[in-house]
Amino acid sequence: MSLVGDPKSQPFLHGRLRGVGFGMVTNGGGAPERVRVVVTFEALAEAGHVEIIRFPDALACFDLLRGRVEAAASTKFDRIGPAVQPFEGVPTILVMTGDAI
């Protein structure tokens, strides 16, 4: 089972994790389930070769890299699968530096 982008999902600031959050859905093997993905500002900065200080900068970078971030989240989900832990009550994948974006 992997993750696919949810075109209805709007990116949002996740201040506690200092990242951009968005939704994806499971694909394959049953009814689709929503999974929250948060990509850290640091991971975006590293992947985009930019400096990110505030949310608008992170959002602009995310918009350019969304496909790559979704692919990284899906790869990580495939690796950890059912071990995805809820964060704030929602199954969450955290994409950070060290994850291939």
Image (cartoon, helix red, strand yellow):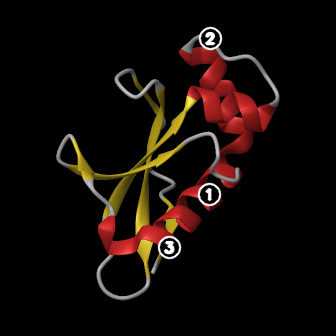
Decide if residue 7 is on the left or right side of residue 89: right
Amino acid type, label 1: Ala
Point 45% across, 81% down: residue: 1
Describe the element under mark 1 as helix, strand or loop. helix
Decide if residue 65 is on the left or right side of residue 88: right
Please rate how many residues cluster around mark 2, counting C-alpha atoms within 10 Å: few if below 14, some from 14 to 19, many from 20.
few
Q: Residue furthest right?
A: 49
Q: Name the residue carrying label 2.
A: 53
Q: Name the residue carrying label 3.
A: 78
Decide if residue 60 is on the left or right side of residue 50: left
> What is the x, y in percent for residue 12?
44, 30
Describe the element under mark 2 as helix, strand or loop. loop
Which of the pair 83/71 is nearer the observer? 83
**CA distance separating discs 1 and 3:** 10 Å
> What is the x, y in percent for residue 36?
37, 50
Q: Name the residue carrying label 1.
A: 72
Q: Earlier in the sequence, mark 1 or mark 3?
A: 1
**CA distance separating discs 2 and 1:** 22 Å
